[in-house]
């Protein structure tokens, strides 16, 4: 800044006229000031420190692209209709799309800064003034004119602002795509959770009916003197436990239905059902190579565009340290009457240029450039963290699917064994070889095993949804190059 100010003082001392310079001289002055200005600060953008895994921790059968409409692979028409309705009517998604429209308008505003401005003016003016002779005169002046102005983008500041706005727009488009992916995944998870709760509710009702039968049998045996009152009281307690479980699950089902209805943009209430939980089969787990994940998630595209926008904003901020050249022109027609204005007006015109160079502003411009540079570094770190999180989410989803498949097989074996134990205990109790407590323990074990199977089935379906979400849901950015406004800095892509 001190070198720039000294250069300005030297140039001013060499001027021989006190009148404003003509446009050519103004342009020459801007070039001289640019030559004397201090070098623009340079701080190369470091590459993202993201280590891409060579392969996923959990091996998969095949590595292929995921279907953009991945939820259709579950083959449930009700789920397909529910997701389609959510993508069309969800309020959060509509807000994200409206935000895209807002940033489209902002981008047009930034692009308009590169163009000249043109304004028309017209109007009468009535004035009363004292003449040189000392008399007072009144006059009416009619005038119509045009003014034009243009800031010459010598250093690319306006182009940087336009590029920053374009990067922000692309980031908002990616954010809207990420919101759509999240809405679809949340809807699918909510539907599978609902079907799991439905299955558990059916099991609880069947268990309640079994407990009612056990209570009637225990009461009959107690009244006939074949069992103690303890068996009867225990059977009654189990009946109330089963009834409480039914009520709890009915409440959970109603709440899940309302949550799905709100997500789909409809009034809370009952929802249609499709395939049962047992009939829903998860699709084969597919995943691309880790090296391609950075191009397949909209949230990563949004983070990348945030880096590009911050880079362009930093370029624009540092350009404010350099002189600005503004060109202006105006033409005005004047007349004292409407007839004179139309037939023989007086033409007044002006053409000029001005150079505005920052000399001393208390370090404000430098501080703004430093703040923009810090924001750029924050955006870069945010991208790195988002990339690492993406790799972890895919790995976690693949590990969950592999683990839950084993759990599902073990849960099914446990259920079969528990059912066999229940049949044996029931026969022993009916034949008088065991107490009711033995049958009661077998009933509890069978119910827990059946419920465990249903919970694992629902968790496995949810894990496949999580995998689809982690892989970006088949999203593609079309292979577009990221927007970076800096002439000497490029946002790295991996």
Image (spheres, helix red, strand yellow):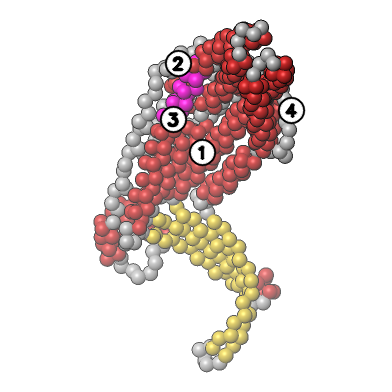
Residue beneath label 1, please?
A: 171
| Residue name at image x 67 percent, y 9 percent | 430
In the image, 289: left or right of 434?
left
* Of pointers 2 and 4, the one earlier in the residue sequence: 2
Q: Is residue 331 above or below residue 454?
A: below
Real-space Cα distance between discs 1 and 3? Answer: 18 Å
Secondary structure character of the magenta stretch overall:
helix
Real-space Cα distance between discs 2 and 3? Answer: 17 Å
| Residue name at image x 28 percent, y 56 percent | 1
> Is 171 within the magenta?
no
* Of pointers 2 and 3, the one earlier in the residue sequence: 2
Circle 2 SS class: loop
Please give the label number shown on residue 272: 4
**Is the residue marked by circle 2 packed among few (<14), some (14-19), or many (20+) residues within 10 Å?**
some
Q: Nearer the observer, disc 1 or disc 3?
A: 3
Write the start and end of the magenta stretch as one range.
387-402
In the image, 33: left or right of 201?
left
Real-space Cα distance between discs 4 and 3? Answer: 36 Å
State the image quarter where residue 186 is shown.
top right
Please give the label number shown on residue 389: 3
Q: Nearer the observer, disc 2 or disc 1?
A: 2
Real-space Cα distance between discs 2 and 4? Answer: 36 Å
């Amino acid at each position: 800044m001190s070198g720039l100010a000294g250069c300005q003082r030297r140039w001013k001392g060499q001027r021989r006229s006190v009148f404003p310079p003509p446009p050519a001289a103004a342009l020459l002055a801007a070039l001289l000031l640019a030559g004397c200005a201090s070098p623009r600060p340079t701080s190369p953008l470091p590459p993202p420190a993201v280590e891409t895994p060579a392969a996923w921790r959990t091996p998969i059968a095949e590595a292929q692209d995921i279907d953009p409409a991945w939820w259709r692979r579950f083959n449930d028409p009700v789920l397909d209709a529910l997701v389609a309705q959510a993508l069309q009517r969800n309020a959060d998604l509509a807000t994200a799309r409206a935000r895209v429209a807002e940033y489209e308008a902002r981008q047009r505003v930034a692009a308009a800064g590169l163009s000249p401005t043109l304004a028309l003016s017209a109007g009468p003016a009535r004035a009363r003034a004292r003449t040189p002779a000392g008399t007072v005169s009144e006059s009416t002046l009619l005038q119509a004119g045009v003014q034009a102005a243009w800031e010459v983008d010598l250093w690319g500041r306006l182009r940087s602002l336009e590029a920053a706005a374009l990067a922000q727009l692309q980031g908002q488009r990616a954010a809207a795509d990420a919101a759509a992916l999240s809405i679809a995944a949340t809807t699918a998870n909510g539907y599978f959770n609902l079907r799991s709760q439905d299955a558990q509710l059916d099991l609880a009702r069947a268990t309640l009916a079994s407990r009612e039968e056990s209570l009637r049998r225990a009461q009959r045996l107690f009244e006939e003197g074949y069992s103690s009152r303890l068996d009867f009281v225990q059977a009654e307690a189990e009946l109330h436990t089963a009834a409480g479980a039914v009520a709890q699950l009915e409440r959970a089902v109603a709440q899940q239905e309302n949550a799905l209805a709100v997500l789909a943009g409809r009034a809370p209430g009952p929802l249609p059902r499709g395939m049962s939980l047992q009939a829903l089969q998860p699709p084969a787990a597919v995943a691309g190579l880790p090296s391609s994940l950075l191009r397949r998630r909209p949230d990563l595209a949004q983070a990348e565009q945030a880096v590009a926008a911050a880079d362009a904003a930093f370029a624009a901020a540092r350009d404010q340290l350099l002189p600005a050249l503004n060109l202006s022109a105006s033409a005005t027609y004047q007349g004292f009457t409407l007839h004179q204005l139309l037939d023989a007006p007086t033409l007044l015109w002006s053409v000029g240029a001005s150079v505005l160079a920052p000399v001393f502003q208390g370090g404000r411009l430098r501080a703004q450039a430093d703040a923009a540079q810090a924001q750029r570094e924050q955006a870069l770190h945010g991208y790195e963290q988002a990339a690492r999180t993406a790799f972890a989410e895919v790995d976690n989803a693949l590990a969950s699917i592999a683990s839950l498949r084993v759990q599902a097989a073990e849960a099914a074996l446990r259920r079969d064994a528990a059912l066999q134990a229940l049949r044996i205990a029931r026969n022993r109790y009916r034949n008088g070889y065991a107490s009711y407590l033995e049958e009661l323990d077998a009933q509890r074990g069978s119910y827990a095993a059946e419920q465990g199977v249903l919970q694992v089935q629902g968790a496995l379906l949810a894990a496949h949804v999580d995998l689809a979400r982690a892989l970006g849901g088949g999203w593609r950015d079309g292979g577009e190059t990221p927007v970076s406004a800096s002439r000497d800095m490029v946002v790295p892509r991996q």
